[in-house]
Amino acid sequence: MSSSTRGTPATEPAPSTAEPLAHQVLAGLAQHRIATTGQLRRMLRPDGTRQVMSRVLNRLRSDGLADRTVLPDANRTRTQAWYLTQEGARLTRDLPVLRGRPPYPITSTTAASLKTPHTLAVVRAHLAFAADARRLGHEHGPWDWTPEVSHSIGEGERLVADAVMHYTAIDSEHRRKLRAFVELDRTTMSSERLAVKLIEYARLFQYEAQPVGRRRQATTGPAWLRRYPVFPRVLFILTGASRTRLENRISDLQAMTAQHPLVAALAQEVPLGAAVLEDLEQHGPTQPVWTPLTGGTPQAWSEL
């Protein structure tokens, strides 16, 4: 599902270098929650040096706007993951690129360490798409990837997508707007719990918000139309286990797609796919590394 336009402005593939790097780092941390020094460099200054990014981060830490946690590493290197302090989150609350995004300050290194592995894996996925977009001349930058987006699915329950991605594929003058819900699986939950996420997306696809008051119309249409012109693709990205185990989990997602009536109905209208994170990083998301959950040969994510 996609829409196509000509001449429609879209976000830049990378932030303008005219804006101070410190401001971009604050905005990037507010948007993505946690990122390593190397990830921030690839996100904001892919042609820059690690030393420049380190100087900016250390200055923000001295000013009390950012802090860091040191990640355990088998090679005994000191990989630092950065996040905003409460004061840093307060300063970024009104940035135009973050309008409508509530701040999520992390109050301690302990709290950061609990969120770090999953959050950094989500950033890895974003960077794979961003690098591919730069290579192909497409548009997908730091502000086109929004983590932790919550949606009501009725009965007081909510679906929180790991990320919502906006991507503009450009072919000559033709601009193709693509959107996707992204679910990042590090193999920390059971395969069945992972597959149940498909039921939640199927419920979101069908959910219609009930109007308040008896005099209003009985229905207002699907609730997702308030946010998206078309329902985004649903992409599962897996990592953290052997190839065999990851392939088994993808097979379980395919089984849920085939066997659950709500998910089967969703699959008739919405592209569903799964891929291994390391394949995205090695080959690129636009290569045929995605397994369609309805079956068939691997494809590019945009062609599911």
Image (cartoon, helix red, strand yellow):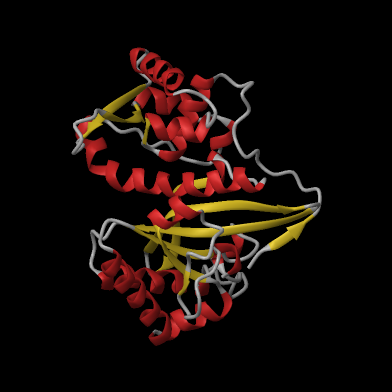
| Residue 207 shown left or right of residue 104 in the figure | right
Q: Residue 194's spot in the image, x, y percent?
A: 31, 67
Q: Residue 287's spot in the image, x, y percent?
A: 54, 60
Question: If the image is split into quadrants, where does the N terminus sit?
Answer: bottom right
| Residue 179 shown left or right of residue 68 in the figure | right
Q: Residue 48's spot in the image, x, y percent?
A: 52, 24
Q: Nearer the viewer, residue 198 or 271?
A: 271
Residue at 46 percent across and 18 percent down: it is 52
State which quadrant residue 106 falls in: top left
Residue at 42 percent across and 85 percent down: it is 258
State which quadrant residue 156 falls in: bottom left
Residue at 52 percent across and 67 percent down: it is 209
> Would residue 274 be visible to someone looking at this image?
yes
Q: Nearer the viewer, residue 103 or 124?
A: 124
Q: Nearer the viewer, residue 206 or 161?
A: 161
| Residue 246 shown left or right of residue 2 in the figure | left
